[in-house]
Amino acid sequence: MGEPKREVESKWSRQISEQSQSGQTVEAFCRERGLTTSQFYTWRKRLRRSSARQFLEVQVTRTPSQPTAGPGRAIEICLSGGQLIRVEPGFDAKHLRAVVAALETRG
């Protein structure tokens, strides 16, 4: 039988990420790796839809009971494409939204 769904998704996620970082056109990238462009575009669309469903908008607020920021209080956000965003205390929420939006539209 074929590869498990998670492995196939992971493989295509890596391919899509590699193409985005390569600077090559989708056509050139696929030709070099023996992939069809229709497969590539289908998987890119499928993975974007899948990752869009996994995101949930959150509001970050500080309440008086929360301790002030200190070392080791950063959070890490791992996106479906494998990108990792480390958010330190005192971050600019508008800037973070812009970064996430840029990563989501890459490709």
Image (spheres, rainbow, N blue to C red):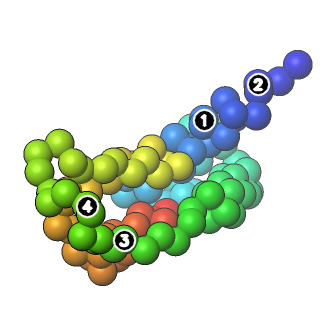
Residue found 62% across the figure and 65% down from its top: 52
Image quadrant where residue 90 sits: bottom left
- In screen coordinates, is 13 left or right of 23? right
Q: Give the CA distance from mark 1 to mark 3.
A: 34 Å
Please state, as top left, top right, bottom left or bottom right, where the N terminus lies in the image.
Answer: top right
- Nearest the viewer among 10 and 33 is 10
**Crowdedness of circle 4 by 10 Å Cα count: few (<14), some, many (20+)?**
few
- In screen coordinates, is 84 left or right of 81? left
Q: Nearer the viewer, mark 4 or mark 2?
A: 4
**Which dot marks residue 11?**
1
Q: Where does residue 40 sit, x and y in percent of width and height?
A: 66, 52
**Crowdedness of circle 2 by 10 Å Cα count: few (<14), some, many (20+)?**
few
Label 1: state its secondary structure. Answer: helix
Q: Which residue is mark 2?
A: 3
Q: Give the CA distance from mark 4 to mark 3.
A: 12 Å
Residue found 29% across the figure and 71% down from its top: 63
Residue at the extreme left: 71
Image quadrant where residue 10 sits: top right
Q: Where does residue 77 sit, x and y in percent of width and height?
A: 39, 51
Q: Are marks 1 and 3 in contact (CB under 8 Å)?
A: no
| Chain-order first, disc 2 or disc 1 | 2
**Which dot marks residue 60?**
3
Q: Which residue is mark 4?
A: 66
Q: Are marks 2 and 1 in contact (CB under 8 Å)?
A: yes
- In screen coordinates, is 60 left or right of 89? right
| Chain-order first, disc 4 or disc 3 | 3
**Crowdedness of circle 1 by 10 Å Cα count: few (<14), some, many (20+)?**
few
Q: Give the CA distance from mark 2 to mark 1.
A: 10 Å
Q: Relative to residue 66, is residue 76 depicted above or below?
A: above
